[in-house]
Amino acid sequence: MKRFHLLFIFLVIILLVSCAGKKDTASVVRTRTMSEIDSLDPYLSTASDTEAIMHNVFEGLVGYDTSGAVIPALAEAWRIEEDGLCYTFFLRPDVLFHDGSEFDADDVVWSISKYAGLDTGRPLSSKFSCVESVKALDNRTVEIRLKEVNASFLQLLSAAITPSGYEDNATKPIGTGPYQFVSYTPGQKVVLEKNASYYDKERIGKIDRAEFYVMTDESAVVTALSSGQLDFAIVNGDNADVLSSRFDIYSSPQNMVQIFALNNSISPFDDERVRMAFNMAVDKDEIIKGVFNGYATKLYSAFSPVMAVYYNDGLDDMYSFDINAAKALLLQAGYPDGFDLVITVPSNYQPHVDTAQIISEQLKKIGVRVEIELVEWATWLERVYKNADYEATIIGLSGMLDPNDILVRYTSYYSRNFVRYNNDEYDRLISSAILETDDAQRAAMYKEAQKVILEDAGSVFICDPNQNIVCRKDLKGYVAYPVPFTDISRLYFE
């Protein structure tokens, strides 16, 4: 009898341990990130993959829903004066930062002042250069005054708010979001944990822990999904098809522009005839089929049709695929035998590497001899994005909540205009649209700007690749946003 009793206790212990193990497994979700973290500090980070992770940690005065519409976040309401220059934000009560400190108006003043460079005279982002002043009216009310009307300003305020005076975000980021930072191992993974003190009980995380593994090799990702090492992940179209019988597939446009960027400031791309020739020589349909297995939308300008209100849908016949016409343009430009070209591509983005290989073969038909230079992500950011030290590149420019944030990239006054596109009329349209509060007029300006840059053949705008998410069948709640955001708070296990 005693032996039976001990055996019963032993079986109960085994059962409890087993159940505990299942609970721990179910409370952890593991996915991939396609590139290395550029910076954990929200004031310094520019990479979309980093943004997709850290939106779980940081919040702004406003947020956005799955349609891209602005919604309240740390500000529960706001008022905009008739002159469009004064914004008053009414802050949520009972919000805590991840270090336990209370969120209040001083944190907003600190953060917005830092973005706008009000203390240094040097804005961290040119988008915040419109801010004239920011002050706390009381602990729960903040007033922001602008130098001039900025129709995009409200969308900018999804930018992270951090604790006043805190300067260690690069090593230990602190926000107010539904998940808090635990650790980052360079080249390996980022770990987040649920913020049990999150103020929005409807959005509080159901998953206890999220692990983002830096994985650039697509075959390794497929293996990890198949073996259960990853619970969900972005994959290419081919692999989405292969895995569709065993996993749920979520596929949707990203509001991204895959661009074959041509450095307009150097020869031969300072000649618009060469740029036009490239627009005629690149077969976008072949790229969409060969690289994305058809999971992409062909583009004709620097804008995705996902943003339908602002998209110019009348540009599809400006350049048709025509090898002979492309050769004739190169002949006119003084390149009867073509020329040598280096396409610099970040090695961690296989779709862009594959696109470069297809384009290399396509350009042979017009005499252009391509060398593909693969570089690390950090090198690409420094050389190409920051210093425009390149001839051509292929990259995906992530979507934004506001059309200005997409199209301002090509203005001559934008500090990170790595394409080095320069057109006075384009600049005028974008700078005028930011002041226009009439939505219809503003949309017309952005549509005209798309036409201007395409007429100049500023670069080759290829497609908006679908984001294909392969997800284990018992993991539910995944939603797509028109901006980079892997929203862990929506996920749960059935």
Image: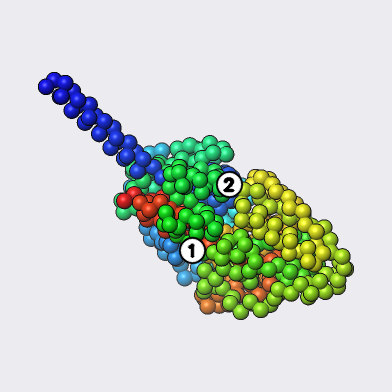
Residue ID at (63%, 76%): 316
Q: Quadrant of the N terminus?
A: top left
**As displayed, is residue 331 above or below residue 489?**
below
Q: Secondary structure at mark 1?
A: strand
Amino acid bearing label 2: Asp
Q: Secondary structure at mark 2?
A: loop
Q: Nearer the viewer, residue 155 or 466?
A: 466
Instruction: Name the colour scheme.
Output: rainbow
The spot of residue 351 in percent (x, y) is 61, 56
Which mark's residue is nearer the viewer, 1 or 2?
Answer: 2
The spot of residue 126 in percent (x, y) is 61, 56
Question: Along the horizontal axis of the image, is 165 left or right of 474?
Answer: right
Q: Can the viewer see residue 420?
A: no
Q: Nearer the viewer, residue 294 or 352?
A: 294
> Which numbered circle lies on residue 101?
none
Amino acid bearing label 1: Ser
Farthest top residue? 2
Residue ID at (66%, 50%): 346
Q: Nearer the viewer, residue 99 or 316?
A: 316
The spot of residue 217 in percent (x, y) is 58, 46
Q: Quadrant of residue 451?
A: bottom right
Question: Along the horizontal axis of the image, is 274 left or right of 470?
Answer: right
User: Rounded to the nearest whole Å, what is the CA distance between mark 1 and mark 2?
Assistant: 22 Å
Q: Which residue is mark 2?
A: 217
Q: Quadrant of residue 271?
A: bottom right
The spot of residue 337 in percent (x, y) is 87, 65
Q: Residues within 10 Å of mark 1 (few under 14, many from 20)?
A: some
> Which numbered circle lies on residue 252?
1
